[in-house]
Image (tube, rainbow, N blue to C red):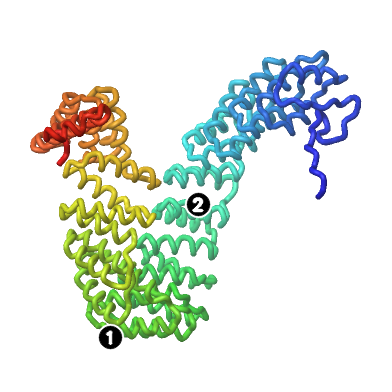
Amino acid sequence: MPPPAKPTKFYFFYGKRKPSQNRPTVKHQRWGPEVIADLSKLRRVNPDMVAEVLKVQDDPNICSKFFHWAGKQKGYQHTYLSYNAFAYCLNRLNKFRAADQIPELMHMQGRPPSEKQFEILIRMHADNNRGLRVYYVYEKMKKFEVKPRVFLYNRIMDALVKTGHLDLAMLVYKDFKKDGLEEETVTYMILIKGLCKGGRIDEMLELLGRMRSLLKPDVFAYTAMIRILVGEGNLDGCLKVWDEMEKDKVLPDAMAYTTLISALCKGNRVDKAYELFKGMKNRRELIDRAIYGALVDGFVADGKVGSALDLLKDMMDSGYRADLSIYNSLIQGLCNLKQLDKAYKLFQVTVNEGLQPDFTTVNPMLISYAESRKMDDYCKLLVQMEKLGSPVIDGLSGFFSLMVEMDERLPCTLEVFKDLKIKGYCSASMYNILLGALYKVRQPKEALSLFEEMKDSNFAPDSTTYSHAITCLVDLEDVREACLWYNKIKEMGSIPSVAAYCSLANGLCKIGEIDAAISLVQDCLANVSSGPMEFKYTLSIIHACKENDADKVIEVINEMLHQGGIPSEIIYCAVISGMCKHGMLEEARKVFSCMKEEKYISEANVIFYDDMLMEYMKKKTADLVLSGLKFFGLESKLKAKGSTLLPS
């Protein structure tokens, strides 16, 4: 075995270099008399050595103390080199706020900061996207009467624009003009891009007009503006920039056309996009296949499937081969028009051309066959997809997910499911999708019937299945049966859905099982990364009850309402649980009274929860008495007398 490597020893001045008589090493972990004693052995201290130490040190406290110690040595004075090294060191160690104070330190020590020192700070903050810090340093520059060069002004404005502080960038630009500086192309483009992103088109056009006096923007500048506006969804702004480009007689390239045409198609302006496409063809520009794809999608979305098919022919005549996404869009459009024969022919084209169609391709046809009850054609298409090697069971799960998106399709979906079961096309995922859909349309009995059918089949229910069963059982007020399936999920080592947690917690509250409901809340928050808001405020209310003050609880409830939460059974039961724990019945009643005044709870519910409050308090009192009797060994005597305190 090789001997263990010796730990690296760092030395002042040359880092890892072998020590000599004049370069003592530091073997101390913190600043103290021992370090100062070793440093005093140095013959001299110079700024180069200070800078070298600061480059390798990773403790900001030691860096600061060493820097200030060096400044107190006889005959030594910090230079710009050591100040800059100190700034870099503090920033590297995430002490950038301390680094911002270095200009004041320099001024106090008789070396006024120059533009270079401020540039270092600005660059550090800009590289880390700290826009407000950039502006803070810029304001400090003005305080020291240091005027930035054009390059540094550009850096400041660019950092502010990129971090979303456009108004501050425009204030800096006003100072730029006051200083009598001349804009560069970069200056204009930084601000123009920022104004585009902020949707301030009129200001952008005004600045663009000023830019023309210096230099006419090229196609790359215009394309950059269009891309930013597209990203913000500002199509009107895109068209205004396009008009300006035409005024300047700047010829758009393929990238500019593709960017704008694609955006117009997605924004339901396919006619305007087609005008640009025709202009592109007249100029004999090279048309990218992406443009054809965008126009096809746009025409299909607009219901103009004929125009989309004409584009397909035009594309193929131009020597292009359509990709699968174009065919998928056309098949969807033809199915929307109930032209299933044409849609099937296009599907056959995708097969013959080896484009590997998947269920995204055939789902529109399957939906149309299902709605028109053409199950023979439906099953033939499934057999064909099997031959193509597509995972049919997984694909059918996606099909059912699409079908149940529209509630009116549910009866048809259930009929298709029955037919597919007979032919052997079935899975647990399909059952789960249908269970969720039935619960969504408030048919819990039908959902539970399907659940029982699944239990008798060869498909084992999973946590999703049981979660759907829980919500349905709670709706049917069979909370105890729902608890059995909750326990089944926990036995499986799985976690119920958030909907199941919420439904079961509120169901337990309705039957007075408050402790079980609170326990369920705690279990949910312990296992779910983003639990429901009402559960988080349930625990906050219980905690606030420790203050024995109804106003504190009302504050928590108002905070929840401000955040968009809605009071539910678990919130009311949290008040009961928290106040009864401390014996504060009247404070609990004050909370309910205040909620009634604010119309968060009805008069009938106030009476209901007041009765629940009394019953819960009696139960807790009985439990307390029973615990005391058990402690003193009197339980057997109490049983002999038939005390009503003991549960039956």
Marks 2 and 1: CB-CB under 8 Å?
no
* Residue under pointer 2: 225
Three-letter code, disc 1: Asp
The picture places residue 75, in percent across and down from the top left corner, at: 83, 14
The picture places residue 522, in percent across and down from the top left corner, at: 33, 41
Residue 43 occupies quadrant: top right
- Helix, strand or loop at label 2? It is helix
* Residue under pointer 1: 376
**Sequence-wise first label, 2 or 1:** 2
- Identify which residue, 174 or 532, lies in the foreground: 532
State how far apart marks 2 and 1 are (Cα).
Answer: 54 Å
Mark whose residue sits in front, 2 or 1: 1
Q: Residue at x 75, y 16 (%)?
A: 33
- Identify which residue, 289 or 519, lies in the foreground: 519
Q: Residue at x 28, y 37 (%)?
A: 538
Horizontal side of residue 639 vs 327, given as left or right: left
Three-letter code, disc 2: Met
The picture places residue 234, in percent across and down from the top left corner, at: 40, 52
Please say whether residue 339 is visible from this viewpoint.
yes
- Identify which residue, 431 or 143, lies in the foreground: 431
Question: In this picture, is 52 found above or below 221?
Answer: above
Label 2: how many Cα within 10 Å (few below 14, some 14–19, many 20+): many
Looking at this rendering, what residue extends furthest in the right direction? 21
Horizontal side of residue 644 vs 578, given as left or right: left
Horizontal side of residue 185 vs 636, given as left or right: right
Q: Residue at x 78, y 37 (%)?
A: 7
Label 1: how many Cα within 10 Å (few below 14, some 14–19, many 20+): few
- Helix, strand or loop at label 1? It is helix
Question: In this picture, is 118 found above or below 354?
Answer: above
- Identify which residue, 170 or 539, lies in the foreground: 539
